Amino acid sequence: MIETLLRRDRLIVTAGLVILFLLAAAWTLSGAGLGMSGAAAPMDMDMDMDMDMDMDMGAKAPASHWSPGRSALLLAMWWVMMIAMMTPSAAPMILLFARVSRQTAAQSSLASSPLAHTAAFLAGYLLIWLAFSLLATTLQARLEGLGLVAAMSMWSANRLLSASVLAAAGIYQLTPLKNSCLLHCRAPAAFLTSHWRPGACGALQLGLRHGAWCVGCCWALMALLFVGGVMNPVWIAAIAILVLLEKLAPAGALLSRVSGVVLIGWAAATLLAS
C-alpha cells in the first residue's frame, strides 16, 4: 500500500514540477509581459547602440521610467525566470521531501497530508527566490538609473560593470561559502535528516531554509544575467544548465571551481579588450 502511495505521490509531484517549469519558461520566453520576445530582445532591440556603449567605459544608457506598474512587472519577470531556472535543479530535493513526508505520515497516527506538506515546502523555497527577485529588481532599477544597464535590452552598457560582475561571480565560485552552500544542495538526504520539521509549518520552514542555501549557492551566477542580458534566453539557459550540473553532476563541485577560474579569466579579457 505504501509503495503505491509513494509512486502516486512521485507522479503527481513530478507532473506538477514539469507543468510549473513549462509555464514559467514559456512566460519568460514570451517576454514576461514586457511587450517583447525574450528570444529576440537581446539581439533586436537597440543592439548597435548597446554594442557601442559596451566599447566605451564612460558611456551611459538612457535611464528608463520605473513606474509602479513596470516595477511590479519586472519583479514578476525576475521571479518567474528564477522559477524556470531553478525548478529542474530543485526537483530531486522536492521529490525526496515528498517521499519522506509520505513515509513519515504512514508511521504516524496523526492526520497528515504529504502532498499538502510538499506544496508548503515548495512555497517556502519559491518565497526565498521571490525575496531574491525583489533585490534583483531593485538593483536593476539602480543600475538603469546610473546608465550602467541598458533599459531596453537589459544588459550591461558598461565594460567595467561587466568585468566586475564576471570577476565577482568567478571569485565567489572559489570561496568556502559557495562550497558550503553547494554541499547542502548536493546532499538532499543529509539536509532533510538534519533539519526535518513536522507539519505544514515545518515544511514551509524547511523550504525557506533550503531556498536560503540555494540562493547562497547561486546568487552570483544569477548576477551574470546583467552581463549577458536579463531576457537573453541563451544566457538564461547556460546559467540554468551550469546550476543544474553543479548540483547534480558527480563532478559538480569541481565544475563550480573550474567555472570560477573561467569567469575570472573572462573578466580580465573583458577589461583589457580594446
Image: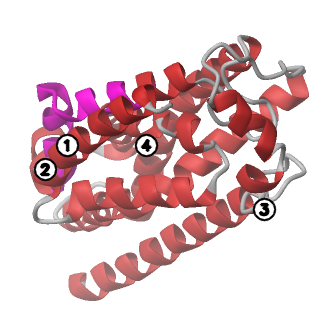
Q: CA distance from mark 2 to mark 4?
A: 22 Å
Q: CA distance from mark 4 to mark 1?
A: 16 Å
Q: Are marks 2 and 1 in contact (CB under 8 Å)?
A: yes
Q: Which residue is mark 4?
A: 125
Q: Which residue is mark 2?
A: 253
Asked whether, in this view, residue 251 is left or right of residue 11, the answer is: left
Labelled disc at residue 203: none
Asked whether, in this view, residue 139 is left or right of residue 29, the answer is: left
Q: Position of residue 21 (x, y in %)?
A: 56, 65
213 over 67 or under it: above or below: below
Labelled disc at residue 30: 3
Q: Nearer the viewer, residue 261 or 25?
A: 261
Q: Position of residue 96 (x, y in %)?
A: 25, 64
Residue at (54% x, 47% y) in the render: 82
Q: CA distance from mark 4 to mark 3?
A: 25 Å
Q: Position of residue 216 (x, y in %)?
A: 31, 31
Rendering quarter of residue 58: top right
Rendering quarter of residue 175: top left
**Kind of residue at disc 1:** Leu
Number of numbered discs visible in the structure rendering: 4
185 over 238 or under it: above or below: above
**Kind of residue at disc 3:** Ser
**Kind of residue at disc 2:** Ala
Rendering quarter of residue 211: top left
Q: Nearer the viewer, residue 224 or 253?
A: 224
Q: Residues within 10 Å of mark 1 (few under 14, many from 20)?
A: many
The residue range painted magenta reads 165-188
Q: Looking at the image, can residue 111 be seen?
A: no
**Kind of residue at disc 4:** Tyr
